[in-house]
Each structure stands twice: as C-alpha cells, then as structure tokens.
Amino acid sequence: MKQIDLYNGKNILVLGLAKSGTATAILLHSLGANVIVNDRNPMENNESAQLLLSKGMEVICGGHPLSIFDRNIDVVFKNPGIPYTNPLVEAALEKDIPVLTEVELAYQISEANFIAITGSNGKTTTTTLIDEILTQDSKLPLIAGNIGKVAVEVAQQATSDNIMVTELSSFQLMGIQTFRPKISVFLNIFEAHLDYHGTVDNYAEAKAAIMKNQTAEDYAVVNADDPVIMKLIQSTSATIIPFSVSKKVDGAFIDDNTIYFKGEKVIDTKDIVLPGKHSLENILAAVAAVKLVGASNESIYNVLTTFTGVRHRLQYVDMIQKRRFYNDSKATNILATQKAIAAFEEDIILLAGGLDRGNDFDDLLPYLKNVKALITFGETAGKLEKTATEAGIKEIKHVDNVEKAVPVAYEMSSEGDVILLSPACASWDQYKTFEQRGDIFINAVHKLK
C-alpha cells in the first residue's frame, strides 16, 4: 500500500456507511484525516457507526444535517448508492467540494495496476473470468469492487506483483478524479438506472468515465458491436482493443466457431461450457484483457472448459423430473433477461418481476417466443402480464413471491422444460439484494426436490 499524505490533516466527510463507507472511513483515519461520518440510520443498532465512534471519529447519525459543513469539509467520500440529490451531496457540489467514491481512494493507495470492468450487463461474469484465468496463469490477481469485495480493503493488500481486477458500477465511476486503469473493459450500454441518472446519455457518460484518464500507454477493451460505446471511445486517448461476436476486428473475435485474438487462435467455441450466446461477449472481453497482460492460451482453455457460471447469473441449480432450473436473479434489467431467454432453445417457464422503475417491458416482446408460461411477482407484475398477453402467452399466473413461484412453475411445466428465474427488475421491492432473491429461489428448488 502506498503511504499517501493527500488527506493528512484534512476534514473528510464520509457519507453513508455499509461496507465501503466503513472501510473508507477507517483507512482515511489511518492516513491522518479528520473523519466526520454521516449515516441516515440511527446510532442505535448501527454497529458500523458505533465502531467508528470507538476509533475516535465524529459520527452523526439519523439524518443529513447541513450544519456538517460548518466543519470546513475539504472532501466528501460518499457511498455509491447515495444519489446526487442528497442534500449533503448537493451542498458539497455547490461549494465546489470534491465528491468522490472509494474507488478513487483505492487507486490512490494501490501499488498494483488495475483491470477495471464496467457495462450494463455481464460485469461480474467477465470480472470472474479474468480473475480465474489470471489465477490459472499465476498472475496474482486481486478481485474487488462491485463484485462484493471493497476495493479500498483489497488495495491495501496489493503489491506491484498483483493486478487489481475490479468490477465498477456507474455509481462508483461518477466519483473518480484521477482513477486510471491500465486496462479498462467496457462491455455494453443498455437503458438502466434511470431513476439515478435521469437519462441514458447521463448513464452512458458515467460508464465512459472508466476511460477518461487513460493515455495511449493504457488499453480500452470495448464492444465493437455497441454503437453507443463506439461513439464514446472518441473522447479517450487509450489504445483501443475491440471485441466482436459478429465481425473480424483487430482484437478478439469469432471466426468459423473459433475465438481469435489479433489473428491468433485461442479456443474453439464448442469447448466452452458456459451456456448462452450472450456469454461469448463476456468471454471475448475477458480473453482480450488477459492476453494484454500476457496470459497463455493454455490458461484460457483450462478456465473456459470448466467455468459454468457465477452464482445468480444464469446459474444451473438442479434437474427435477427432467425439468432444468436456472437462477438468473442478477437479471435486474430487460437486457439481461433478453439474453437469458435467448440462451435456451427449449420451452421456458419464466419467473419475473420486481421493483418498478417506471419502464415498460415492450423490449421483451421479440424474445418471448419460446416462453410458454409466465409467473409474476412484485411491483411490476401487471406490466409483465400485459407484455406476456401481447406476446400470446396463454399461461400467466401471479404469486406473492419467488418462493411461491417455484412449485407453481413446476406444476405448469413438462419434461424437457427450463424453469428460469430472470426477473428483469431489481429486487428491492421485496428483497434486500438480488442475492437474497436468488438464494430463496435455490432453496425453494431444493425443497421441491
């Protein structure tokens, strides 16, 4: 870990706790900052707040009082999920106080280079593939970011021998100033998180920040099949490495059922065990990233011939009476569900629904041809049922939750069918996380068996 003095003696506001906020506050305190912590949850039963208080930090809980700025705040580090409409964030920006996320701090202290991955869909699978291939190749990766391991914690352990493999959301990328990955990976752009960003353009620009500080000495691995991304790369100085599932490019591509990188054969697609055509985008991006740091084709082959997927991302759960169950709870938007459905040729019993962000589901219509039945739950149930009716799906049922959907789906299914949880919505109307939703589905399947 680099010993930096950027924050020594500075008044730093850490806004919002959870894992990243707590870790950020502890690190800043150790770097000599005067840390003021603000969390909306009351001090009572707030273990993180109590921990920071015991370490000598000032902790203000239960609201967001503007009087915090009487302390002459120099920098704000906010939890990525806190919107920019938060009164403290708005006040900081009005006062020209930098508002950062912990990714910036992780970069500032890390001795290791970063491979940073973003996109609307496929981030976790791509990040995991890169990590596993580099591990296989003895490149000493450290996985971090939106995948569940707080970047500032991981970065403290990183040396120059490591590679930080970091999944980044648009929320995290909005709070960077100097963050500069050696390799950025930009998978795709799809309409998402409009309740946070307001417009698709704002969302795309937030994602594109992953490339903004890169130079010609750095690489941007980008989806050549995504027109939005191809427009956004015009503003970066990075060396562009494209990948494409549809055409030959000067990067990673598929030709005659074989994956190539810059003309070199890497692996035949028939040897890849990860299901679904959509997975090839993630695989191509991962191949490009690892080849840029010198990974061998042998290591790539060993991983791609054994890697069956990430938990909650088109995860095979079990087979019961010749019905296959798949958990795709991470499908929190329409694009993810489109790709999940397209991964199967069999008839599908689709389980979908969740948080209503104001969108409709017309974009699902062309993908519902092999969906023979729909089971809905959550706030968007009515909208999904309307779309299913327009698609000509005859069997549509509404249930209270995911757990109740599983036995109903089994009763509606036949031998050879796929029973697929792919909600097309965030989980927060009924569940704390998509992981909780997926775990409930898995447990219900096991209970059914």
Image (spheres, rainbow, N blue to C red):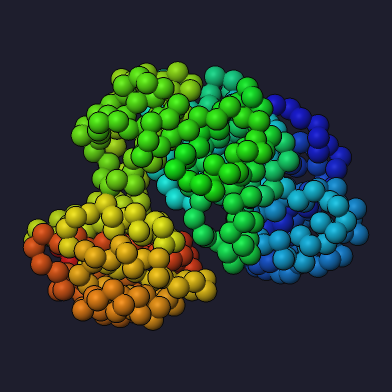
Q: Quadrant of the N terminus?
A: top right
From the viewer's perspective, tell me whether residue 329 is left or right of residue 26. left
Which residue is rendered at x = 39% and y = 56% of the image?
Answer: 336
Q: Residue furthest front?
A: 247
Q: Quadrant of the C terminus?
A: bottom left
Of 219 and 48, the residue lying toward us: 219
Q: Quadrant of residue 135?
A: top left
Which residue is rendered at x = 47% and y = 40% of the image?
Answer: 223
Which residue is rendered at x = 59% and y = 51% of the image?
Answer: 204
From the viewer's perspective, tell me whether residue 335 is left or right of residue 405. right
From the viewer's perspective, tell me whether residue 28 is left or right of residue 224. right
* 158 up-or-down from 9: above or below: above
* 29 up-or-down from 220: above or below: below
Of 385 and 30, the residue lying toward us: 385
- Viewer can see residue 268: yes
Q: Position of residue 392 (x, y in %)?
A: 24, 76
Q: Quadrant of residue 160?
A: top right
